Image: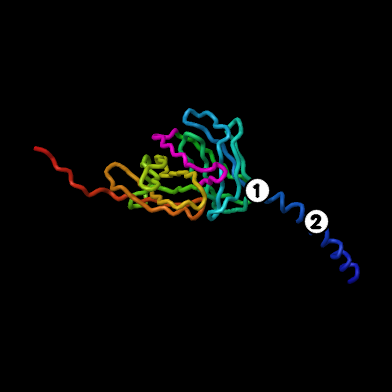
Amino acid sequence: MVTRHCLKNHLLCPVVAIAVFILLPWCSAAQGIRGQLLDEKKEPLVSAVVHVFLNGTVQGANVTDYDGNFIIKPLSPGRYSLIAHYQGYDTLAAEVLVTPDSLTVFNGTFKKKWRMITYVPNCNIGRLRNYFVYGKVKNRLGRNLSGANVVLYKDGKPYDSVRSDKHGNYGLRCTEIRLVHAIYELRAFYPRRDSAVIDINFSESILKQNIVLKRSRRKVERKI
């Protein structure tokens, strides 16, 4: 009796191991991010580049198809930073939560740059690398500020700019030579609030930087 029971367990173990080996990749492949990227006229954007980061490291990337759709998988469960960019449009940046055994949906709308600032470095294009800085613009109470102007400066000169969306999100891209020695800073502006200036160190390919704008206390003199 004992021998028969041991024999069943002996035969059952390989079957369970094979089942786990087959099902485990399928389960991980079911997790990821999918969505659609459009312009302000609700037209799909073809070949928009989408990157997904976790703790500053790229976990996946893809480009949109003719309908503006993209999908990135497999991804482990967790909170990811999604950066999407398209030439001539503001960079999209958002945090996306990937849950087990499901595809998280992220749909975004690109906006035309409100001010185009062109900068072409004098170097071999093969040595260029993309750096991203993103985050939220908030007031001192933690409320999101929509429409704030965020400008990235390099060596004291404007490099790129964007307006925060309705959720206070902003995202900027910097295409540079790897390990270039330059001074970068963020400057944020909003009506009736003090501007903010933040030094930026691109030690990693992606940097999260939230911006807090305080209400201006300047007194306006009234003319009688």
**Highlighted range, magenta:** 112-130
Where does residue 199 sit, x and y in percent of width and height? 38, 53
Question: Which colour assignment does the render follow?
Answer: rainbow
Where does residue 131 sit, x and y in percent of width and height? 50, 48
For mark 1, give the secondary structure: loop
For mark 2, give the secondary structure: helix
Residue 125 in magenta stretch: yes
Residue reaching furthest left?
Answer: 224
Decide which of tag 2 and tag 1 comes sooner along the chain. Answer: 2
Image side of residue 70 versus residue 132, left or right: right
Quadrant for the N terminus, please. Answer: bottom right
Residue density around tag 2, few if under 14, some if 14–19, many if 20 or more, within 10 Å: few
The residue depicted at 64 percent of the width and 46 percent of the height is 73
The residue depicted at 18 percent of the width and 46 percent of the height is 219
Image side of residue 14 versus residue 157, left or right: right
Judge whether 47 appears above or below 129 on screen.
Answer: above
**Residue nearest the viewer, comparing 157 with 211:** 157
The residue depicted at 28 percent of the width and 46 percent of the height is 193
Quadrant for the C terminus, please. Answer: top left
The residue depicted at 37 percent of the width and 44 percent of the height is 157
Mark 2 highlights which residue? 18
Where does residue 14 sit, x and y in percent of width and height? 83, 60
Location of residue 71 (image quadrant): top right
Mark 1 highlights which residue? 74
Query: What is the C-alpha distance between the residues marked 2 and 1?
Result: 21 Å
